[in-house]
Amino acid sequence: MKINENYKNLSESYLFSTIAKKVAVYTQQHPEQEIIRLGIGDVTLPLAAPVVDALHAAVEEMGKKETFHGYGPEQGYGFLKQALMRYYARRGVVLAENEIFVGDGAKSDIGNILDLFDVDNTVLVPDPVYPVYVDTNVMAGRRIVYAAATRENGFLPMPQADVQADLIYLCSPNNPTGAAYSRDQLQAWVDYANERGAVLLFDAAYESFITDGDVPHSIYEVNGAETCAIEFCSFSKTAGFTGTRCSYTVVPQALVRGSLHLNAMWLRRQTTKYNGVPYIVQRAAAAVFTEEGQKATRAAIDYYRANAAVIAAALDEAGIWYCGGKNSPYIWMQCPGGMKSWDFFDHLLEHAGVVGTPGAGFGAQGEGYFRLTGFGDAEKTRLAAQKLKEAVRVL
Amino acid sequence: MKINENYKNLSESYLFSTIAKKVAVYTQQHPEQEIIRLGIGDVTLPLAAPVVDALHAAVEEMGKKETFHGYGPEQGYGFLKQALMRYYARRGVVLAENEIFVGDGAKSDIGNILDLFDVDNTVLVPDPVYPVYVDTNVMAGRRIVYAAATRENGFLPMPQADVQADLIYLCSPNNPTGAAYSRDQLQAWVDYANERGAVLLFDAAYESFITDGDVPHSIYEVNGAETCAIEFCSFSKTAGFTGTRCSYTVVPQALVRGSLHLNAMWLRRQTTKYNGVPYIVQRAAAAVFTEEGQKATRAAIDYYRANAAVIAAALDEAGIWYCGGKNSPYIWMQCPGGMKSWDFFDHLLEHAGVVGTPGAGFGAQGEGYFRLTGFGDAEKTRLAAQKLKEAVRVL
């Protein structure tokens, strides 16, 4: 029996475990010091009332023989896909119902989509990056090349004519940097992919945080994307579903390579290796698109974005360069005085009791940068912003 | 960009779509005839009251900031894994908490586990079989060999010394045949796998239907299984979770090949490509193991098993050979008078208005057999059994 030896090539990620250990040591030494955690990208507000109501109603249905739901369609119920079609149509993107696949999370979908591609492909991944893009391809044994995201390019790398890439990951608004591509920039990526027959894997998990009119919410707002792009999105950040689990993936019918239709391949993959999202969760997700649902979930996003603005204002006052915050819950700041990521982590914990995420943990180009999130409590975030300014001042 | 060309080797499964088309034509021609569906393996009873109560309580938690749950552990919450440890311990199987992985369905887990194995392995699959075992390996391009399940071996094929196999699928109690391996038979498979370093993929999805004391509920009741077997199980049939989605997979710490621990590999796979089962669903699954939960879910299983017994009694009266029904919701009957599977399907639909599943749809060895399920309504199943007897009599 031969094991998948590619697993030996995975590097252990010590990022969040190292953070946890450092915080534990500090807490033991300073039991009186309050710790404010602005590190991990998890939401803190509860599910919105219309979503809670929809869940209770669906649970009641499941408890009665006449309204019970057994196996559903693996690719999601029509009521949810139709709500998503209307959501896309608001921005002029017309999708067919069978181009939408409901899933349990963008992480699952982004990992599982790789089943459709040969091992012998070159994958282009931005650096710094969400580690899942890298690890899922290392597991399969694909070649990986990196596109450097730097302060010079606004952490928005553009296509390079001399780089050969078959699968291209884009995340906009970006995790971890919060940077978001403009329409023209995405058009350049779409044209590049179409010219070479490459496939764009477009991660739109943070689209609901976009405020800038020039930043597309969907790759399909860009001309020609339907022949080269697969889009992933999730209810996790849009509606606080990190513990409730629902996502959606769009695979256009026009996305064809040789004789194979990627839409049909993904349908076959999902019907063979997946059995769909719980009925009650799909009802909860559909409730996000009602008038009350939109109002309540927009309020939560505004709350998180206001937190990011508070952090941004503190950095402006301190004269520190950053990107993100505007179209994103993430602030990506340059460590002051040329400090390294982990050194600034230690300094901020020591002098402010604030926990963030060292940029070096997201890739080589992240060294010297630091991620803070707007997902915390509003009052604590205000306190953290104040302490951040003071901690920078003493440097 | 190179697509995964193995998808071209998948054969389209027309089984359930052909059934649906035939039933639609018949219904149009005979609008007065009631159709009784004993074909698809989906449950019909609602979620048990203790499960519904647990769901409502968990939804309330999700609606309040103080008790909200965001990202949970990808491999499942401790409260559910501990309930599963106690469930296994009842039969003397001692598992560590980190040997259990909570998932969204046995279909997902059985498909995704293949990430751990090299393409260059030979897979042994029983015939007839749950089509997922075959299709997931065709997608990856692995060699498949079949173990013939026949009336002669009671639809329980045993290891053949001259067959080289690296990955071996066993499903007991079996879908579609309802046959269940004894302890001695499973010991022979475990010994065979350990001798050759093969890995057994043991599908225990129907374990809760077992009545026979000599039939193990878990492969780990068999000596030596911890060094060769991965076990998959689900709440779908045990507690009517086909539309609620929860499963569990056991990967023992002792399962090591070369320098790679399969438990660590699966943990890495799941933490990289998966984000866990909804908190509310894990609370629902844990409620299955309370005293009230066990009572209510056992009652549903007894109901389905009684349906299977009604069908079995009708076949006994008609003098037709069958297996299953005793430790399984499935009855696997030989078509009367040497009829082929689809001919008997047409005959039963025409003369009884009863829909079953042609055995030929599960593999070449299924030809001449027919599957009926106990998952229907009790009264309709009694009526179907009566009509089945009459339909056989007129042949």
Image (tube, coloured by chain):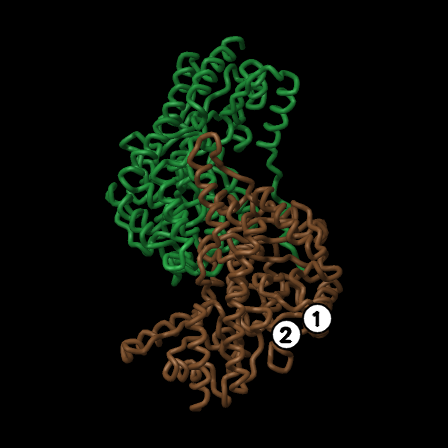
Chain colours: A brown, B green
Label 1 vs 2, first from the N-terminus: 2
Number of residues whose C-alpha sits closer than 10 Å to that of mark 2, classed few (under 14), some (14–19) or many (20 or more): many
Q: In the image shown, does A106 or A228 lie closer to the viewer?
A: A106
At a point 44% along the width and 60% down the height, the residue shown is B271
Residue A227 lies in quadrant: bottom right
Residue type of the residue flagged with mark 1: Gln
Residue type of the residue flagged with mark 2: Leu
Residue A171 lies in quadrant: bottom right
Q: Position of residue B193 (x, y in %)?
A: 37, 46
At a point 68% along the width and 73% down the height, the residue shown is A158
Q: Position of residue A325 (x, y in %)?
A: 56, 73
Decide: is A322 above or below B281. Answer: below
Is any part of residue A50 visible from this angle? yes
Decide: is B344 above or below B106. Answer: above
Do marks 1 and 2 share a chain?
Answer: yes
Q: Are marks 1 and 2 in contact (CB under 8 Å)?
A: yes
Residue B75 lies in quadrant: bottom left
In this figure, which residue is indicated by the disc labeled 2?
A156
Q: Position of residue A263 (x, y in %)?
A: 65, 49
Decide: is B245 above or below B21. Answer: below
Numbered label attached to residue A185: 1
Q: In the image shown, does A340 or B272 lie closer to the viewer?
A: A340
Q: In the image shown, does A66 or A175 lie closer to the viewer?
A: A66
Disc 1 chain ID: A
Q: Secondary structure at mark 1?
A: helix
Q: Secondary structure at mark 2?
A: loop
Q: Could you tell whether A301 is left or right of B307 in the image? A: right
> In whole angstroms, how far apart are the C-alphas of marks 1 and 2?
9 Å
At a point 39% along the width and 41% down the height, the residue shown is B235
Q: Position of residue A93 (x, y in %)?
A: 70, 54
